[in-house]
Image (cartoon, helix red, strand yellow):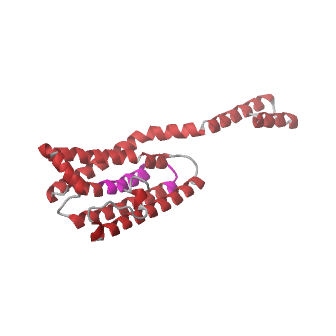
Amino acid sequence: SVAFLSDSIKVIIVGGISPHDLADLMGEDLEVHHEEAKGPAGTLAKVADALPGLGIVAAVLALILMGAAYVLARKIENFSIVDIAWSFNFTPIAVAAAVLGSAVLERRLVMAALVALWSLRLAVHLARRVAALHPVEEGRYLELRRRWSADVNASFLRFFMLQGLLNVGLSVPFMFVCMNPSSSPGLGMTLGVVVFVISMGGEALADAQLDAFRKDPANAGKVCQDGLWRYSRHPNYFF
């Protein structure tokens, strides 16, 4: 407001403008100041308006892919593949957000690339683990089979669909990034990439340490307490 008044006084002192034109000029300046003041709120409102449509697209993608994974799980009699499907699903959701988003292209491309890199690495890692155990399911899914023995197939179908919905919920930040109409990416995106690199590197190292622990016959039946896995425990917990 001080800058606005100062600029207006300068125009009056210098002269060369009629009172009518000065009033119009002040009105235009007020509109500019008003738009700048509501910038963050306006940005949030635009993102919120676009989010439901993108969320529906993401939900359809996730549920279709989870449905296909469930059919495959029934065919091979191994429900452990739900972990692979859950990890993979973030890639098509992120790509859809990048394609349909209204943010600057650079921001959308970086977001989609980072999510896909993390998602596919984890999916491949889990696929190798599931394949090494197949046809035996991982312990927690054997336990779920036991608990749901009265209606195992329907129970696992609900479980798969729930994982798909979790994919969508956890993807909301990706959608916000791709719908953000603000100016070109800057320091915030750079810091985000740095955090991503550190986190993904830590997750990959923790997974490798767990694999090494499991391959040692002396560790049969033990809980891994080695390296970063001691703190990570699971890809979702720390990294």
> Relative to 189, does residue 1 appear above or below in the rendering?
above
Residue at left offset 69%, top offset 33%: 30
Q: Residue at x 60, y 55 (%)?
A: 187
What residue range appears in magenta?
85-107
Quadrant where the C terminus sits is bottom left
Residue 43 visible, this angle: yes
Residue at the left extreme, as displayed? 150
Left or right of residue 40: residue 95: left
Asked whether residue 88 is drawn in magenta, I would say: yes
The rendered magenta stretch, by its main secondary structure, is classed as helix
Q: Position of residue 224 (x, y in %)?
A: 35, 62
Q: Nearer the viewer, residue 145 or 177?
A: 145
Which one is in front, 123 or 21? Answer: 123
Residue 231 image position (x, y, % from top left): 43, 57
Residue 169 percent across, percent down from the top left = 38, 44
Q: Residue at x 35, y 48 (%)?
A: 167
Q: Residue 119, percent across and down?
A: 37, 58
Up the image or down, 230 lies above or below 19; here it is below
Can residue 101 be spotted in the picture?
A: no
Left or right, 100 with respect to 211, comes to right
Whether residue 109 sits left or right of residue 159 in the image: it is right
Q: Is residue 86 magenta?
A: yes
| Total tally of numbered discs in the picture | 0
The quarter of the picture where the N terminus appears is: top right
Query: Which quadrant of the view contains residue 73?
Result: bottom left
Q: Is residue 78 above or below residue 214?
A: above
